[in-house]
Amino acid sequence: MSESKKPDQVVFNTETQKYDAALKPYATSVGAPVITTTDTIAWKNRSINKVNHKVKARYLELKEAYDKMLEEYEYNQLIYNAKFTFEPIIGETYHLYKRENEETFLSIIAPEQCNFNAIGSFYLDADQIWKKIDNEHDR
């Protein structure tokens, strides 16, 4: 059995016994459009640069949130380990002081009304988390 050879301009796959010009990833005739590869290096470099900036910005946001949470945790530890003889009311502001012996205590007396060694003023929120405030208007 002899196979009939197809002319050079005909794209015929001898393995599948089919005409597959449309399936080829390259031009198969003189009249076919020119296939050129797109230069993606510039796009990749711009994209990498953008992604790096976004990731860095997101990292800085998360780091700032983490630092704030850590500071909040430390203040809460400090207050819950301080001495006080009253039950703090949610939504009120209290003041944390340090004695000469380094012992901390919580008071309702504002720093302007006494001459204790003030650490700061704190607001007890609805979740019973102490929030540091600079003045009464920060609540």
Image (tube, rainbow, N blue to C red):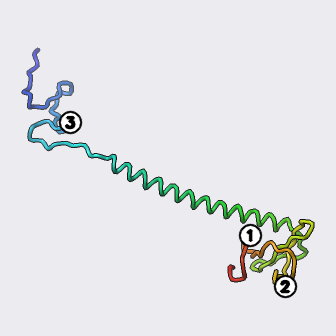
- The residue shown at (40%, 52%) is 47
Label 1–label 3 contact, CB within 8 A: no
Say which mark, if any, is on residue 24.
3
The amino acid beneath tag 2 is: Gln
Residue at the disc numbered 1: 129
Pick whichever of labels 1 and 2 is earlier in the sequence: 2
The amino acid beneath tag 1 is: Ile
- The residue shown at (92%, 66%) is 101
Q: Position of residue 42 (x, y in %)?
A: 33, 49
Of all residues shown, which one is farthest toward the right? 101
CA gap, disc 1 and disc 2:
25 Å
Q: Position of residue 138 (x, y in %)?
A: 68, 79
Pick whichever of labels 2 and 3 is earlier in the sequence: 3
In this view, the residue in front, 111 or 22, is 111
* Residue 93 vertical placement versus 129 (above, below): below
Q: Position of residue 81 (x, y in %)?
A: 85, 65
